[in-house]
């Protein structure tokens, strides 16, 4: 949907705590990413986010990175394309892992066929959620101050 609105010239704001959406900042100049828990806008990285994440992996999405390539090495490689090319060419397994990860991490553009997408809007049932949290033993979440802060985080969306 960001591409559709981008092409119309609309400003787009994506509200999510999922770091996968950072890649949109590299692609669309009229896109902003707001993190609702941190209550801040995420800055556009000065490197290709998908490349960086493909090197180091994404534990949240169960995507293993290139062995031995953590944040520091990935930072160094994305800022020096020649060094990255050299690094990947030295080991065919690195190249395979990198290419696989790029395909897994890069968001797919469905804008040519929006009929395969479905938009739904949830209804907040805070009482039901509180009961579920209680059943799960999340007692600290149910303290009045914490619970109110939690609800306020999602209340304006």
Image: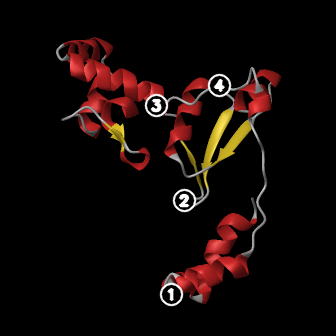
Disc 3 versus disc 1: nearer the observer = 3
> Between marks 1 and 2, how big is the CA–CA gap?
22 Å
The numbered disc on residue 38 is 2
> In what element is the residue under mark 3?
helix
The correct choice, above or below, for 30 with respect to 91 in the image is: below
How far across and down, in percent of the image, does residue 107 sit?
Answer: 56, 31
Nearest the camera: 123 or 155?
123
Which residue corresponds to mark 3?
104
- In space, the residues marked 1 and 4 are separated at their CA atoms by 41 Å
Query: Can residue 46 be seen in this snapshot?
Result: no
Residue 116 picture location, percent across and down: 74, 32
Total label count? 4
User: Quarter of the image holding residue 29?
Assistant: top right
For label 4, the residue is: 109
Q: Secondary structure at mark 4?
A: loop
State how far apart marks 2 and 3 are (Cα). Answer: 26 Å
Residue 126 is situated, as x and y percent measured from the top left of the image, at 71, 77
Q: Measure the alpha-carbon separation of dots 4 and 2.
A: 28 Å
Q: Earlier in the sequence, mark 3 or mark 1?
A: 3
How many residues crowd mark 1 within 10 Å: few (<14), some (14–19), many (20+)? few
């Amino acid at each position: 949907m960001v591409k559709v609105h981008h092409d119309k010239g609309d400003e787009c704001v994506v509200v999510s705590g999922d770091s996968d959406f950072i890649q949109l900042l590299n692609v669309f100049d009229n896109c902003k990413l707001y993190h609702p828990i941190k209550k801040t806008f995420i800055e556009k990285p000065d490197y290709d986010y998908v490349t960086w994440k493909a090197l180091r992996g994404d534990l949240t999405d169960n995507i293993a990175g290139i062995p031995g390539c953590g944040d520091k090495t990935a930072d160094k490689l994305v800022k020096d394309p020649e060094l990255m090319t050299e690094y990947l060419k030295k080991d065919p397994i690195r190249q395979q892992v990198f290419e696989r990860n790029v395909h897994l991490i890069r968001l797919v553009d469905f804008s040519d066929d929006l009929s395969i997408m479905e938009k739904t809007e949830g209804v907040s049932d805070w009482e039901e959620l509180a009961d579920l949290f209680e059943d799960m033993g999340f007692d600290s979440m149910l303290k009045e101050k914490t619970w109110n802060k939690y609800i306020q985080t999602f209340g304006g969306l």
